[in-house]
Image (cartoon, helix red, strand yellow):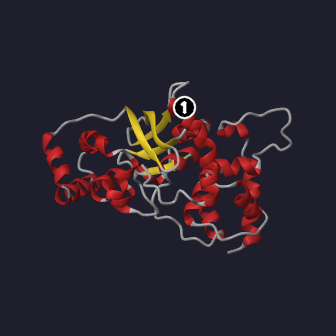
Amino acid sequence: MNHSELAAYLKSRRDRVRPADVGLPTGPRRRVAGLRREEVAQLAGLSADYYTELERGRGAQPSAQVVAALARALRLNGDERDHLFHLADRPLPPATDGPAGHVQPALLGLLDQLTGTPAQVITDLHEVLVQNRLAAALIGPPPAVRGPGASFLYRWFTDPEARKLYPPEDHDHHSRFFVADLQAVAARRGRDPGVHEMVTALRRRNEEFAALWEARDVTLRRADHKRIVHPALGVIELDCNTLFSEDGRQRLLWFSAPPGTEGAAQLELLSVIGTQDMTAGAIGDRPGA
């Protein structure tokens, strides 16, 4: 890994991005035209100290997931992203024409402005593409896997750990919604092999899924009231809203609570606890929705 070249390249790209490009205010006290180091760190879901060490040519080699997060935060195009992976001595992610290959700019722009509430962009198969720091603190980062296991929907029916995100009494509700949503996605995608393989595998592996699939209920999950189990804050009651991309293959999810409610107070605490947990890496075992 070329620490000095990586550091210089990160700084050059940071200087190029204007705050308005990522939904940040441009106040009179700003001394730099581009982004501050702490702003890049926030956009990438990293600690400011860690990113500062990278720009100083020190610190540990960043993982492929961190490199991808930096590429998104710095608004790199395909060639620039590949160059960043080369400088970090990380293998390039496989090329794909699917919805996970590139976060749609409109959704990414909105996500950048949702700094005070947990939010993330997912595919229609419930694969997390990018999330802000509060979403990572609330539900955990996405798993570092590819294939069906990247889908929270798939893990919901195959991995008991995934179900710890919600109270047991809510599991039936979420199971019905997941399957009804997948019915709509499967019909819209037509003969998509990825959807066909997921449905076939789940029908074979999970009796609950098979029974719900045969019921043929169809509902796109546009909004829901969720109770999320957090290891430090307990059960947090939140509204989850969804904005769909024009082609329906990506979704922006954000979590909120009415002012004055316990959920709103818990989100305020999460903004503090979540930052500390991310710095220490203490949320790595959360299931990730």
Relative to 150, is 245 above or below? above
- Of the 4 image quadrants, the one containing the N terminus is bottom right
**Which percent across, then down, holds residue 78?**
57, 56
> What residue sits 77% from the left and 47% below the top?
36
Residue hosting label 1: 264
Q: How many marks?
A: 1
In terms of depth relative to the viewer, which is nearer, 227 or 190?
227
In terms of depth relative to the viewer, which is nearer, 187 or 155?
155
Mark 1 element type? helix
- Quadrant assignment, res 171: top left
Amino acid type at image mark 1: Ala
**Which percent across, then down, holds residue 270?**
58, 42
- Quadrant assignment, res 84: bottom right
Relative to 33, is 84 above or below? below
Q: Is residue 229 visible?
A: yes
> What residue sits 75% from the left and 69% below the top?
58
**Which percent across, then down, holds residue 54?**
73, 64
Q: Is residue 75 visible?
A: no
Classify 10 Å Cα crowding around label 1: few (below 14), some (14-19), many (20 and above). some
In terms of depth relative to the viewer, which is nearer, 276 or 135?
276
Q: Looking at this view, name the residue that lies furthest to the bottom.
A: 1
- Quadrant assignment, res 269: top right
Q: Is residue 234 left or right of residue 75?
A: left
In terms of depth relative to the viewer, which is nearer, 46 or 111?
46
Relative to 225, is 129 above or below? below
**Which percent across, then down, holds residue 167?**
35, 44
> What residue sits 23% from the left and 35% below the top?
218
